[in-house]
Image: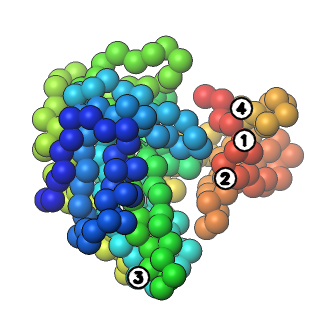
Amino acid sequence: MNIIKLSAINSTNDYLKILVQQQHIEEYQIVWAENQTSGKGQMGTEWCVDSGKNLTVSVLLKFYSVNIEQLFGLNIAVALSVAQTLDFFKVSNVTLKWPNDIMSDNRKLAGILIENIFKSTGDVISISGIGLNVNQVEFSANYKATSMSAVVGKEFNRDEILIKLIEHLKCYVFRVKNSEYELLWKEYHDRLFKKDVAMMFELPSGKQFSGVIKGVTSQGKLEVEDESDTILQFGIKEIKLLY
Ligand code: BTN
């Protein structure tokens, strides 16, 4: 594994993004920081975790003549590889909360931020940022967060986890490049958080309603069946899951 290990950086995604624009970088180059001073989460949020206890890594992937299905498949592949790694280390009840949070029961264990650089040739350089809570056991009450250590009740060796994670990532990315979307899609749905479970949702207007998650479309929209049996589709900022 090619790892650049840093004690502190603003964001591993930003670091790798700059690096790849300055020099030739091999696929699967990893950047791992013990501490991120401006770690980035999805939708402009911050990713704030304790220094030295977790995995905050970015991995470089390359896609040639990319199509939209591949890029969407990549999101699923990264999420599934984290989930499979957690299974391997005996973390219980790992599910994927749409769009791609990794959960154990009702708590978030890991998050993914994928940033793509589109080349004029049609090739895409993809930076997959993964924040996995490993040995941190205290979290702000504002977040429904947890870690591998909190779930399993022991400390983990982070190097071993990273090795397994990259091993799984390579298998899943191979499947994306091989266009095996149907099977990936099935695996994603088999792991989908609260699928077929009645729960409450909130719209941006503040209106709440009861419904059931039925799946995710190939465009990445969440499908929710409401009480009148109508299937509604929502984009990322269009619905909140109340759980
Ligand atoms: C989320 O909001 O769930 C996504 C969190 C992604 C965090 C990771 S940590 C490594 C990489 N570098 C960043 O700045 N963010 C991602």
Q: Is residue 83 visible?
A: no
Helix or strand or loop: what does disc 3 sit on? Answer: loop
State left or right for residue 134 relative to residue 177. left
Frontmost of labels 4 and 3 is 3
46 or 102, nearer to the observer: 46
Give the crowd class for mark 1: few <14, some 14-19, many >=20 residues within 10 Å: some
Above or below 124: residue 220: above
Nearer the observer: mark 4 or 2; the answer is 2
Which residue of the protein is positioned furthest toward the front in this rendering?
A: 22
Q: Is residue 59 visible?
A: yes
Mark 2 and mark 1: Cα distance apart in space: 9 Å
Give the CA distance from mark 2 to mark 3: 28 Å
Q: CA distance from mark 1 to mark 4?
A: 10 Å
Foreground tag (1 vs 4): 1
Residue type at tag 1:
Ile
The residue beneath circle 4 is 200
- Counting residues from the N terminus, which is met first, the one under dot 2 or under dot 3? 3
The yes-or-no answer for disc 4 within 8 Å of ligand 1 is no
| Residue 71: percent from left, percent from top | 50, 69
Point out residue 173 in the picture as x, y percentages from the top left corner.
34, 69
- Cβ(mark 3) to ligand 1 < 8 Å? no
* Amino acid marked by disc 4: Met
Which residue was labeled with disc 1? 239
**Residue receiving disc 3:** 64
